[in-house]
Image (cartoon, grey):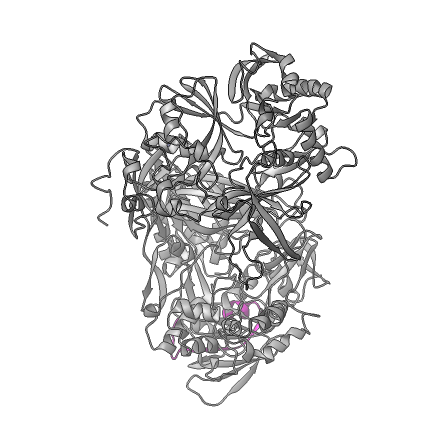
C-alpha cells in the first residue's frame, strides 16, 4: 500500500520496492532508497524528537547532514544501539528499528517539557551561573537532575561487537563533495590520468541536483547526468569513488580524514564487512566542493514539527517522491523557496501563501509562482507559528507592524538564504573573508594547496559553478604533475540560480522576552539568548558562543552560526566582520569512536610481550602481572595457596635451597667498539676503564640534572664489549638516552649500541644450592669461587648451547643469571628445573623477587626512586667515581639544592608491631598529634611481609633520614596511626656472607 | 599528521615515525663539572619557547633512528627545513620572507 504522503510517479525511487521499518514501536512501510526521514514523512510523521534543553517537540529541519533536530536511536540488537543518528542521513533498510530520544514517558507526552515552561531557569549562561551556586548543591542536585532532564541519546552499555577498518591512501587530486562542482572537478582531473579520489557523504552523488528540477546538463536531467558522470569515473583505473564518505577533518599538509559508512545502510551487514572505514588521505591537491547549506528564518516558534528548510521539502518531493504536507506555507527572504513552492504546487500540493520579507523582489520564479496562482506577499513577516506537536498555522504581519492574519498550514517551508560550507576550508587554516554585498563568508586566504569551487566558494549558478570547477580540477591535476589535458567540459543546458537572503532575526523573533525564536535548534538557543549574552558583556563571538552554546552542538552550527553572529553584531551595533566568525573544528559531522580506534582495541590495543619461558610458567599455573607491555610471572601458587602463602614459601625456599626466576624481561644493551669503555664512563656514574674483562659492576645512570635515571649490572665481556642490563621498563628510554649522547654529544666516540633484550633469555638461579643446580649442565666454565667470583661473567655453553653466565645476585644469596639465546630459553629452563627439583628448588615470581631484594635493601629504580632522587639520597655514593671529571649528571648532582641538608634519603622502616605491614605510598610525620594539614616528611616506597625476617619490612624516603637512625616516626592511616622506627636498609644477612654461602 | 623530511633518509615521512627531542643547538660544555650555577641553569633549564621560528631536535625513531635538527614555525606548525645533527644553524631559511 502506498504511504499517504507518497506522490505516485514523483521522485526517483522505485516505489514498488518496499521496506518495512518501525519507529517508537509503530510499524511503517517505506521504499528502497528512502532515508528514515523521507520514509517517516511519507507516512505523515513529522514529530520525531524532543529538544535538548526545553524538550520541545521537534521534526525534520533538513534533508541532509546539517540536521539538528531529528536525532534518533537505531537499534539492531542489544549491543548495536546507535544514539543520535540523524534520521535525514540514515538510509532505510528492511527491518530498521528506530526510537525517539530525550522524552519520557512518550514522545507526544513528555514530562520533561516542563523545562519549556520553566525556561527562564535555563537561559543563556545558565551553566556558568549555576556553577556559582553552592558546590554541594551542584554536585548533589543540579548536575544529576540536569543530566537526566536535558540530553541527547543514551550511550550503548555493551561492548561494540562491530569491527572497523582503516586505510591510508595517497592521491594527486582529492575532491571533497560530489555535487555538480565536485563531479566536474573530478572529471577534469581524472581525464589527465592523475590519481583522483572523489568522496561524498551521501549514498548518491549529485548534491543539490537531487532537488534542482531546473538543472539540465549534457542534454539530460542534472541528477541523471551526475549518475552517468560518476559511473564513468568509477570505471577509470586512476579514480577511486567513495560514496557515504564524509571528510570530517582537514589537517596539515593536505592530510584529510574521511569516514566511509560501509554497512550501516544494509539489512544484514554480515561478519565480514566493517561497519565503517577510516580513510587517511594525503593529497597533492585538494578541491573543496562542499556546497552550501540553507538557513532557516528566525521567528517565534519556528521549531514546530512541519517547519523545514525549503530545499529539504524540495528534496523530499523531487528525490523521494514525498509531500511534506497538503497545504504548505512559505516564508522566505530569498528566491530559492519559490522554486520549492512551484515544484510542490505542480505536484498537487496546495501552497497557502508565500510570505516574502523582501520589499519588491523580481525574477522569473516569482512570476512563475504567481502564474501558478500562488498568493505572494512582499514586505511581510511570519511572526509566529501555531500548533504544538505539528505546525497548524502561520501568523503574518507587515514587517513594520500592522494587522495580523493567521493562515492555516500543515507545513512551512523557509529560506533565509544559503551559507557557503567553509568548514573544511577553515579547518585547513584558510582565512575566510566577508563579502559585504552577498552577506556571506567565503574562502579568502589559503593556507594549503587547495581550492574551493562552486557554492562553497560563493559561486552562484550552475554554469558558473561547472566552469569554475572544471578549470580548477584541470589546474589541480596540472599542479600535481599532469601533462596531458584532454576531455571536455560538461555543457549546461539549463540551470537555476539564486543568492542573497537575510541574516539574523526576522521581525517575529521578538523583542518580547517570552518568545522562542530559535537560532540553534540542537542546543535550544534563541535570538533572545544571544541578545542577552551581549547585554551581559559578551562582546566577542567566541564568548557569545560559549555563553549561549550557540553552534556548539554536534551539528556544529551549520544552520545557526551566521544567524547567531548577525544577531550579536546587530545588538553590538557593529558590522559582522568586526564581530568575527567562530573557528570551525573537526569533525564536520560526528565521528564514531570505533572508526578512530579501528583495530586498536582489546588484545590489539597494545602489544603484549611474553618471554621464551612464558608457556612453561603458564603450564605451572603461574599468576601473571603486567609490567609495561610484558607479562611477568608474579607468583607460582601450589594447590590451596593464596598469594601470601605462595610468596612466603617461595621466599623461604630461595634462601634455604634455591629458586629459579625468569629475568628475561631485563633490558639488555650491548655496547661495542674501541671507545666502549670511554662511552660507559660518560653515561654511568661508575668508573669502567679499569674494570677487567670477565668482571661485572652495578652501574647507575643519571640524567643531566643529577637524578637517577636507571641502574643495572654491567658485565665486561672483552676490552671493547659491554653487556649492559637495564630495568625492565627502562630499556627503550635508556637506549634512546644512550643513542642521543652517542649521536649528538659524543659522536667522536667509535661505539655501536645494539638492543639485545629480545635475543637473550635470562634465567636467574639464586640460593645456596644454585651452583649445584647449574654446574652439571655447564661446559667450558670453571664454576669455582676462585675462578668465578661474585660479580663476574663468563662465556661458555650450557645444555650444549652458548651462554653468557653471570655470577650475580639480586637476592643476597649465592646467585647466577644464565643468559641463553631466546630460542633455547625454555629448553634450558626445563633442564635447570629438572636439576633444581633434585635439590628442592622452587620457581619464584616477581613478588618474591621484590621481597628478597627488599630484605637486602637493594633498590628498584622507579619504585624507591621517583626522578628526584640522587645517588646520595639513595645511599649509593659508593657507586659514583670520585676521580671522574665528566659523566652525564656530574654537574647537576652538585646543584646547591641537591647537596643541601635535609634532603629525603632512603632508609629502612620497622613497624613497632612487627605484624603490621605499611602501605606503599603512605606518608610519614614526626608528630602525629599536630594539626591537619600535617607536615609530611617522607613516604613509604616499598613494604612487604618478610617471612625470612619474621616481620614486616619497609623502605622509605625520609627527610634527613640517615641522621634519624633509631628515631620513632609515625604513619597516620584512616584507621589509626602506625608507629615506626628508622633503620638501615638491610634487614637480612647484614654482613653479606650469604653471597658466597 | 605532518610530513617530516629526514635529512639522512632524504625522504618525507609521516610524523608517526618521529619523536621530538627538544630544542637544538644547546651545546653541552666540554668542561661540564666546572660550569657555574648560572651557566648550568641556562644549559639545562632555560629554553627559548618562541612564538615563531624554533630550532629543534627530532629523531627518526621508527626509521633510520638518527637524531637531526629541524626549523619549524610554531605558529603555522610548518617545517621550514631539516638538517643533520652537528651542522650549524642555517644562515638563511627557505620561505622565511613570507
Ligand atoms: Zn631517517
Judge by depth and name the residue closer to the eye, A342 or A358.
A358
Q: Which residue is nearer to you in this view: A161 or A239? A: A161
Q: Is residue A835 above or below residue A468?
A: above
Query: Quick one: which residue is furthest to the left in this view?
Result: B91
Identify the residue at horizontal 71%, vertical 70% (top origin): A105
On screen, residue A15 versus residue A64, left or right, reads right
Where residue A957 sits in the image (x, y, percent)? 51, 46
Q: Which quadrant of the structure image shows residue A839?
A: top right
Count of numbered circles in the view: 0
Q: Is residue A797 above or below residue A682?
A: above
On the rendered structure, is A677 left or right of A617? left
Q: Is residue B9 magenta?
A: no
Quadrant location of the N terminus of chain A?
bottom right
Depth check, front residue: A781 or B97 = A781
Q: Taking the image as drawn, is residue A989 in sight?
A: yes
Pinpoint residue B4: horizontal percent, then vertical percent. Answer: 36, 39
Residue A146: x percent and y percent?
A: 60, 70
Q: Which residues are magenta?
A: A341-363
For residue A388, what is the image quadrant? bottom right
- For the view shown, which residue lies furthest in the front direction? A966
Residue lying at the far bottom in this picture: please name it: A403
Outermost residue to the right: A640
Q: Is residue A474 left or right of residue A563?
A: left
Residue A244 visible to an observer of this rendering? no
Q: Nearer the viewer, residue A97 or A428?
A: A428
Quarter of the picture holding the C terminus of chain A: top right
Residue A342 drawn in magenta: yes
Q: Position of residue A677 (x, y in %)?
A: 38, 23
In the picture shown, does residue A402 fall above or below A995?
A: below
Amino acid at each position: 500500500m502506498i504511504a499517504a504522503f507518497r506522490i505516485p510517479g514523483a521522485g526517483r525511487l522505485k516505489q514498488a520496492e518496499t521496506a518495512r521499518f518501525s519507529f517508537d514501536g509503530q510499524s511503517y512501510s517505506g521504499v528502497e532508497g528512502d532515508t528514515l526521514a523521507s520514509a517517516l514523512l511519507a507516512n505523515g510523521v513529522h514529530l520525531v524528537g524532543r529538544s535538548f534543553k526545553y524538550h520541545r517537540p521537534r521534526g525534520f529541519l533538513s534533508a541532509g547532514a546539517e540536521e539538528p533536530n531529528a536525532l534518533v536511536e537505531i537499534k539492531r540488537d542489544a549491543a548495536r544501539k546507535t544514539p543520535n543518528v540523524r534520521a535525514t542521513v540514515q538510509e532505510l533498510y528492511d527491518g530498521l528499528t528506530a526510537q525517539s530520544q530525550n522524552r519520557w514517558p512518550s514522545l507526544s507526552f513528555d514530562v520533561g517539557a516542563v523545562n519549556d515552561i520553566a525556561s527562564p531557569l535555563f537561559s543563556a549562561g545558565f551553566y556558568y551561573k549555576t556553577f556559582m551556586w553552592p558546590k554541594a548543591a551542584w554536585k548533589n542536585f543540579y548536575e544529576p537532575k540536569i543530566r537526566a532532564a536535558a540530553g541527547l541519546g543514551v550511550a550503548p552499555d555493551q561492548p561494540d561487537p562491530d569491527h572497523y577498518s582503516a586505510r591510508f591512501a595517497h592521491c594527486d587530486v582529492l575532491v571533497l563533495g560530489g555535487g555538480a562542482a565536485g563531479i566536474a572537478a573530478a572529471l577534469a582531473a581524472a581525464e589527465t590520468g592523475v590519481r583522483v579520489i572523489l568522496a561524498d557523504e551521501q549514498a548518491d552523488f549529485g548534491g543539490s541536483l537531487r532537488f534542482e528540477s531546473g538543472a539540465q546538463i549534457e542534454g539530460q536531467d542534472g541528477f541523471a547526468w551526475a549518475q552517468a558522470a560518476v559511473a564513468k569515473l568509477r570505471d577509470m583505473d586512476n579514480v577511486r569513488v567513495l560514496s557515504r564518505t564524509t571528510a570530517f577533518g582537514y589537517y596539515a599538509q593536505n592530510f584529510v580524514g574521511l569516514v566511509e559508512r560501509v554497512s550501516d545502510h544494509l539489512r544484514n551487514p554480515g561478519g565480514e564487512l566493517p561497519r565503517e572505514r577510516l580513510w587517511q588521505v594525503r593529497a597533492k591537491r585538494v578541491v573543496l566542493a562542499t556546497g552550501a547549506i540553507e538557513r532557516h528564518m528566525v521567528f517565534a516558534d519556528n521549531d514546530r514539527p512541519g517547519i523545514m528548510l525549503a530545499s529539504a521539502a524540495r528534496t523530499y518531493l523531487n528525490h523521494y517522491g514525498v509531500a511534506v504536507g497538503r497545504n504548505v506555507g512559505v516564508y522566505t527572504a530569498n528566491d530559492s523557496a519559490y522554486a520549492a513552492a512551484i515544484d510542490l504546487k505542480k505536484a498537487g500540493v496546495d501552497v497557502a501563501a508565500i510570505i516574502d520579507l523582501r520589499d519588491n523582489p523580481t525574477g522569473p520564479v516569482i512570476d512563475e509562482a504567481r502564474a501558478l496562482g500562488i498568493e505572494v506577499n512582499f514586505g511581510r513577516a511570519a511572526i509566529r507559528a501555531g500548533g504544538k506537536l505539528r505546525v497548524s498555522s502561520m501568523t503574518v504581519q507587515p514587517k513594520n507592524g500592522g494587522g495580523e492574519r493567521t493562515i492555516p498550514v500543515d507545513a512551512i517551508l523557509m529560506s533565509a538564504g544559503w551559507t557557503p560550507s567553509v568548514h573544511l576550508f577553515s579547518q585547513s587554516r584558510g582565512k575566510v573573508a566577508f563579502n559585504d554585498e552577498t552577506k556571506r563568508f567565503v574562502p579568502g586566504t589559503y593556507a594549503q594547496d587547495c581550492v574551493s569551487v562552486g557554492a562553497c566558494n560563493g559561486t552562484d549558478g550552475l554554469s558558473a559553478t561547472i566552469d569554475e570547477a572544471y578549470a580548477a580540477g584541470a589546474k589541480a591535476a596540472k599542479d600535481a604533475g599532469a601533462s596531458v589535458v584532454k576531455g571536455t567540459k560538461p555543457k549546461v543546458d539549463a540551470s537555476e540560480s539564486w543568492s542573497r537572503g537575510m541574516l539574523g532575526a526576522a521581525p517575529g523573533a521578538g523583542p518580547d522576552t517570552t518568545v522562542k525564536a530559535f537560532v540553534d535548534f540542537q542546543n535550544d538557543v534563541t535570538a533572545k539568548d544571544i541578545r542577552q549574552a551581549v547585554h551581559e558583556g559578551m562582546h566577542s563571538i567566541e564568548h557569545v558562543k560559549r555563553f549561549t552554546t550557540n553552534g556548539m552542538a554536534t551539528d556544529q552550527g551549520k544552520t545557526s552560526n551566521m544567524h547567531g553572529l548577525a544577531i550579536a553584531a546587530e545588538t553590538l551595533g557593529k558590522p559582522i566582520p568586526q564581530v568575527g566568525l567562530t573557528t570551525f573544528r573537526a569533525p564536520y559531522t560526528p565521528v564514531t569512536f570505533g572508526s578512530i580506534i579501528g583495530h586498536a582495541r582489546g588484545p590489539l590495543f597494545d602489544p603484549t610481550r611474553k618471554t621464551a619461558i612464558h608457556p612453561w610458567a603458564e603450564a605451572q599455573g603461574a599468576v601473571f602481572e603486567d609490567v609495561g607491555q610484558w607479562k611477568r610471572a608474579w607468583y607460582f601458587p601450589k594447590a590451596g595457596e593464596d598469594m601470601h602463602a605462595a610468596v612466603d614459601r617461595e621466599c623461604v625456599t630461595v634462601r634455604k635451597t634455591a629458586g629459579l626466576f625468569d629475568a628475561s624481561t631485563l633490558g639488555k644493551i650491548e655496547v661495542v667498539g674501541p671507545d666502549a669503555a670511554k662511552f660507559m664512563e660518560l653515561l654511568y656514574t661508575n668508573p669502567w676503564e679499569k674494570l677487567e674483562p670477565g668482571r661485572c659492576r652495578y652501574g647507575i645512570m643519571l640524567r643531566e640534572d643529577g637524578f637517577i635515571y636507571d641502574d643495572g649490572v654491567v658485565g665486561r665481556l672483552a676490552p671493547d664489549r659491554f653487556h649492559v642490563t637495564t630495568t625492565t621498563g627502562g630499556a627503550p628510554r635508556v637506549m634512546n638516552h644512550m643513542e642521543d649522547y652517542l649521536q649528538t654529544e659524543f659522536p667522536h666516540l667509535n661505539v655501536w649500541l645494539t638492543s639485545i633484550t629480545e635475543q637473550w633469555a635470562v634465567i636467574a638461579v639464586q640460593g645456596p644450592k644454585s651452583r649445584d643446580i647449574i654446574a652439571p649442565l655447564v661446559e667450558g666454565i670453571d664454576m669455582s669461587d676462585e675462578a668465578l667470583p661474585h660479580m663476574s661473567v663468563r662465556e661458555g655453553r650450557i645444555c650444549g648451547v652458548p651462554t653468557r653466565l653471570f655470577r650475580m645476585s639480586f637476592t643476597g644469596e649465592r646467585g647466577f643469571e644464565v643468559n641463553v639465546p631466546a630460542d633455547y630459553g625454555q629448553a634450558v629452563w626445563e633442564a635447570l628445573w629438572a636439576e633444581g627439583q633434585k635439590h628442592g628448588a622452587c620457581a619464584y615470581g616477581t613478588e618474591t623477587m621484590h621481597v628478597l631484594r627488599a630484605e637486602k635493601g637493594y633498590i628498584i629504580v622507579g619504585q624507591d626512586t621517583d626522578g628526584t632522587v640522587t645517588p646520595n639520597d639513595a645511599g649509593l655514593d659508593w657507586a659514583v667515581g670520585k676521580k671522574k671529571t665528566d659523566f652525564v649528571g656530574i654537574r647537576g648532582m652538585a646543584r646547591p639544592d641537591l647537596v643541601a641538608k635535609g634532603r629525603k634519603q632512603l632508609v629502612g622502616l620497622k613497624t613497632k608491631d612487627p605484624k603490621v605491614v605499611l602501605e606503599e605510598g603512605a606518608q610519614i610525620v614526626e608528630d602525629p598529634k599536630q594539626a591537619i594539614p600535617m607536615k609530611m616528611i617522607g613516604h613509604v616506597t616499598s613494604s612487604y611481609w618478610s617471612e625470612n625476617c619474621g616481620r614486616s619490612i619497609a623502605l622509605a624516603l625520609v627527610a634527613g633520614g640517615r641522621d634519624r637512625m633509631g628515631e620513632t616516626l609515625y604513619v597516620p592511616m584512616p584507621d589509626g596511626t602506625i608507629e615506626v622506627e628508622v633503620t638501615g636498609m638491610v634487614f637480612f644477612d647484614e654482613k653479606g656472607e650469604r653471597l658466597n654461602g | 599528521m605532518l610530513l617530516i623530511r629526514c635529512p639522512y633518509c632524504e625522504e618525507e615521512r609521516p610524523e608517526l615515525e618521529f619523536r621530538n627531542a627538544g630544542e637544538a643547538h644547546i651545546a653541552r660544555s666540554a668542561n661540564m663539572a666546572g660550569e657555574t650555577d648560572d651557566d648550568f641553569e641556562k644549559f639545562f633549564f632555560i629554553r627559548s619557547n618562541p612564538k615563531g621560528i624554533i630550532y629543534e631536535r627530532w629523531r627518526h625513531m621508527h626509521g633510520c633512528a638518527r637524531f637531526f635538527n629541524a626549523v619549524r614555525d610554531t605558529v603555522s606548525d610548518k617545517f621550514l627545513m631539516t638538517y643533520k645533527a652537528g651542522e650549524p644553524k642555517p644562515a638563511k631559511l627557505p620561505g622565511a620572507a613570507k
